[in-house]
């Protein structure tokens, strides 16, 4: 019994930090999506990295870009978090979003950690693979 408890403790001690990281990253992305759903661009802007904030300069410009360039992010009908991966030292969270018309969109969120908080450092639209005939 002691061996089982020790094994369980080692397992949880090894993987708990990774689970917490996944949950924190997903909470950051979901927090921004929730803010977009309320048209609360000021709050959504707080989830963006300093680089992204500097590019847009204001939450209003940022909100306008999202509405025009990423309408599926502005008003998602469904959000599914997929794999979190490390690409050359950058953490990328893949997210599958269904828009209000039922179309699916795959997005990669690049995440950075600043002052014990995760920030979104960019979003890339992932093109669907070509389907053979």
Image (cartoon, rainbow, N blue to C red):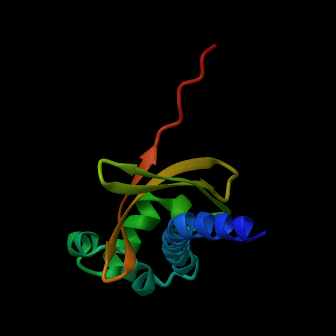
Residue placed at 39% from the left, 51% from the top?
86
* Quadrant hosting residue 111: bottom left
Query: Residue 124: x, y in percent?
Result: 40, 51
6 above or below 129?
Answer: below
Q: Foreground: 24 or 120?
A: 24
Query: Residue 126: x, y in percent?
Result: 46, 43
Query: Residue 21: x, y in percent?
Result: 49, 69
Asked whether, in this view, residue 72 is left or right of residue 85, the answer is right
Position of the C terminus by quadrant: top right
Residue placed at 58% from the left, 76% from the top?
37
Query: Residue 64: x, y in percent?
Result: 39, 71
Position of the N terminus by quadrant: bottom right
31 above or below 126?
Answer: below
Number of labels in the image equals: 0
Residue placed at 50% from the left, 70% from the top?
17
102 above or below 74?
Answer: above
């Amino acid at each position: 019994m002691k061996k089982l408890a020790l094994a369980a403790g080692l397992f949880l001690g090894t993987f708990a930090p990774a689970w917490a990281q996944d949950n924190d990253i997903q909470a950051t992305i979901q927090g921004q999506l929730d803010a977009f759903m309320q048209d609360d661009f000021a709050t959504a802007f707080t989830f963006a990295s300093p680089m992204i904030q500097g590019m847009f300069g204001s939450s209003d410009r940022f909100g306008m870009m999202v509405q025009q360039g990423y309408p599926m992010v502005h008003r998602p009908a469904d959000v599914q978090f997929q794999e979190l991966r490390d690409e050359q030292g950058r953490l990328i969270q893949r997210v599958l979003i269904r828009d209000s018309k039922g179309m699916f969109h795959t997005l990669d969120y690049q995440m950075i950690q600043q002052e014990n908080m995760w920030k979104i450092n960019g979003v890339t639209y992932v093109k669907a693979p070509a389907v053979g005939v």
